[in-house]
Image: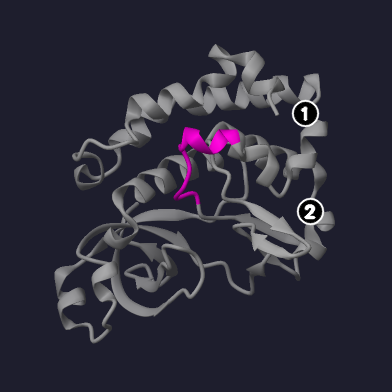
Amino acid sequence: MNINIMEVIDRSRQGVTRPFLCRGDDGQLYYVKGKGAGFRALISEWIAGSLGQRLGLPIPDFRQATIPSELIQLSARPDIGDLGVGTGFASKLIQNADELSFLFIGQMDETLRARILLFDWWTANEDRTLTENGGNPNILWVHRDHAPHVIDHNLAFDDSALTSFWGNHVFAASRALWSKSFRETEQQRMEAALGDLDLWWQAMPPEWTEIEGEVTLESVRKLLWRFKNEPASFWEAV
């Protein structure tokens, strides 16, 4: 279900795209990425988020958000043009969450770490880095529940990221958990998720996809079927 943005409250100070904190007509708060993020980023968020949720990963609920012209025209924010009129990607705010710190990695379920690693390798998303010296994990952590929430997939589907993936990913060591049974289970899940790829693509607004770019349905499909069409390089390459 799509939402309409009723109010722009603030803007994130983190991340390259710096999404806007907004209130939807459903009364909920969302971080919204609009035109300023680029349509490639919105496509990546929508498709990767849909895949991740279908796999059962803890990805916050998200919607397509209609940003009305009146909201932009009447805003006093000097950066409101980065949100822009049209359809944006809205990720529901996770209350009482902080960015995952290096100290709390060990508190995450080890199988979940291995599954997130596989998901990022599958979608060619290396934008999840963290060491004792800092980084950008793109995972929120709710201390009360010891619950992770996986966010920010705007850089997914970039096959050039695969060459440096294993040297940068926060959970690279979790590849040791990719046992035969793990691979078989996850491959079944990935195949099932890909059954809805075309539907998710068609659900995006034309303004996101009408300009031919580097992320197309065919390029995404080819990338995501590597585990089946190029199993040796997908499962064994490091």
Q: Could you say which quadrant of the image residue 31 lies in? A: bottom left
User: Tag 2: residue type?
Assistant: Met
Q: Which residues are magenta?
A: 153-163
- The numbered disc on residue 48 is none
Q: Name the colouring of the figure.
A: one colour
Task: Give how far across and how far down residue 103 sits, in percent.
Answer: 82, 64
Give the side of residue 162 with respect to residue 4, left or right. right
Task: Give how far across and how far down residue 217 sits, in percent.
Answer: 34, 29
Whether 212 is drawn above or below 136: the answer is: above
The residue sitting at 43% across, 48% down in the picture is 45
Give the side of residue 80 with respect to residue 98, left or right. left
Tell how many labels. Answer: 2
Residue labelled with disc 2: 108
Q: Nearer the viewer, mark 2 or mark 1?
A: 1
Q: Could you say which quadrant of the image residue 126 lies in? A: top right
Task: Give how far across and how far down residue 26 sits, in percent.
Answer: 37, 67
Q: Is residue 155 magenta?
A: yes
**Which image quarter is the C terminus in?**
top right
Q: Secondary structure at mark 2?
A: loop
Task: Give how far across and how far down residue 61 sits, in percent.
Answer: 49, 55
Q: For this rendering, which residue is in front, 203 or 170?
A: 170
Q: CA distance from mark 2 to mark 1?
A: 17 Å
Residue labelled with disc 1: 178
The residue sitting at 49% across, 35% down in the picture is 160
Q: Is residue 198 magenta?
A: no
Whether 157 is drawn above or below 78: the answer is: above
Q: For this rendering, which residue is in front, 197 or 210?
A: 210
User: Is residue 218 among the parts visible in the rendering?
Assistant: yes
Crowd band around label 1 with a 10 angstrom C-alpha radius: few (<14), some (14–19), many (20+)? some
Crowd band around label 2 with a 10 angstrom C-alpha radius: few (<14), some (14–19), many (20+)? few
The residue sitting at 41% across, 67% down in the picture is 19
